[in-house]
Amino acid sequence: MNFSVLLWRNWDVRSRLFLIILLPVIYMFCSIVWYSYHSRLQEAQTELAERARVVSTALAESVEYNLLTKNMSGLKNTMTDVMQSDRNIHRIDVMDPDKKNIVHIISMDKVQEVSRYAEVPVKRRQLVRLNLMKDAEQEQSGIWPLDTSEHDKASVISDDDDVLGYVRVTMSTDRMLDKHKQRFVFELGLSALAMFVSAVLAVYLALSLTSPLQTSIETLREIREGDYSTTLAVTTGGEIGDLQTSINAMSVSLQQAKQDLENKVQERTQDLMASRNEALKANAEKRKLIQKVHSIVEDERKSIAIEIHDELNASLIAARLEAQRIQHLAAQIDASPVTVEIQERAKAITKLTLDLYANGRNLVRRLRPEVLDMLGLQGAVEDMLRHYNTNAQGCQFHFDSEGDFAQLDSALAISAYRIIQEALSNILKHALATQVEVALTLLPDLQVLQIEVSDNGSGFDIHHNTEGIGITGMRERVAAFNGEFDLRSSTEEGTQIMIRLPLTPA
């Protein structure tokens, strides 16, 4: 039941209409055919039974005299005439009162015998009536038969109901059934023609209903695909006509809504383009500002480094020379505790000035590496890695370079130096690495300076961990030159930084 319901639900409207119209027609056709067949069969049987009864009754009346007189040839002739008069008779039997067959004839036609037959007794009534007529004639003439007494007359009249024998007529159903079969075939043809006309009418009605629905569905599909300009011709009335009109109204409404939406999208796009241009302009200005700030910072660092190198270091050298002079003068005085203390204090001042001078040199190197101006970017990076290899325990720094870096712009060179310096500082602080690779590559075809820094440290999750100030600073320096910054990190492979800086400013 559930399967049939699901199957019905999956049918289209045309199939459902065919089924709704044809099912009653098929049911009516089958009912009419069944009723006609059984009614014809019953009618044939009834007609055969009636004919058998009539024929047997008529034959019983005809063979009474022949049966009484034992005239077998006349009896057979009568039976033959009766059989020839009706082709539906299969067999005629004449029997004695004990129902023993006296004579019978069988039709020569090859027909099917049935078990139903009509049996009528042959009585003396007809003979008695003849005798009475003779007696009446004799009475009118006044003559009675000599051997006939009053008792005999009464005896003859009283035997009016004596049975002389029986006549049995067996009918065949073949011819009668053939006649009714022809009638049944004719009725079946009429019913089949009616069913065919009903089927054609059902197909026509279904097509007349489903064709507008199919056209409406195709129009709705075109509307679903975005063709709102399509229109549907109203070809019928009723609910389907209302549906076609509604589809046209919906198409017009959707077309108007689409146009309104496109206008709003265009306006919004223009606003977004304006905002994007403003953002790009602001971003370009921010990059220029960052680059300017970095330039100012580097200039200030350079100025501070020069001042420390020229003034502070000169003062420290003078202080050291004065302390050495005091120590030399104290050595010329006679030895005493005071002179010894003066010499010790002079030595301490000399050592202090040397330490301050060394710290000043380191500070100058951090503010503005002199080697960058003297040896360029490649020499400055090599000197920095040499310094890290000397001071960093448990970590080895390797450097590889390719290209001529002598013609690099000073601002680009100092930015690249600061980026490498910040990357190595982060590795020493957080990575716990044992191997660090630094590579500088100049790509003249692409006009790009490529910087690669990688380590085998602990790494971090770049999707969940927030970037520190060092990485943010590197990104800002790269963005100031419109460069590319690619950071990859995992706990199994450490951290890799790939930076590309254009040689010519955008």
Image: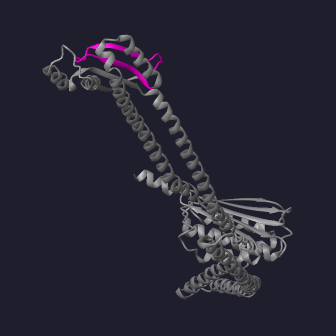
188 vs 106: above or below: below
Q: Residue furthest front?
A: 142
Left of 107 or right of it: where is 231? right
93 vs 287: above or below: above
The C terminus: image quadrant = bottom right
Magenta stretch bounds: 87-111
At x 47%, y 25%, the residue is: 85
At x 55%, y 74%, the residue is: 466
Number of numbered discs present?
0
Q: Position of residue 370 (x, y in %)?
A: 76, 75
Q: Residue furthest left?
A: 151
Q: Can residue 41 be found in the magenta stretch? A: no
The image quadrant that residue 235 belongs to is bottom right
The image quadrant that residue 383 belongs to is bottom right
449 vs 370: above or below: above
Q: Position of residue 356 (x, y in %)?
A: 64, 82
Foreground: 353 or 441? 441
Left of 32 or right of it: where is 94? left
Report if residue 299 is visible in the image.
no
Report the coloring of the rendering.
one colour
Report if residue 2 is visible in the image.
yes
Left of 361 or right of it: where is 173? left
At x 24%, y 25%, the residue is: 139
Foreground: 20 or 410? 20
Q: Can residue 106 be found in the magenta stretch? A: yes
At x 53%, y 52%, the residue is: 22
The image quadrant that residue 39 belongs to is top left
Foreground: 413 or 506? 506
Q: Position of residue 216 (x, y in %)?
A: 65, 67
Left of 475 or right of it: where is 492? left
Q: Position of residue 428 (x, y in %)?
A: 58, 67
Foreground: 140 or 464? 140
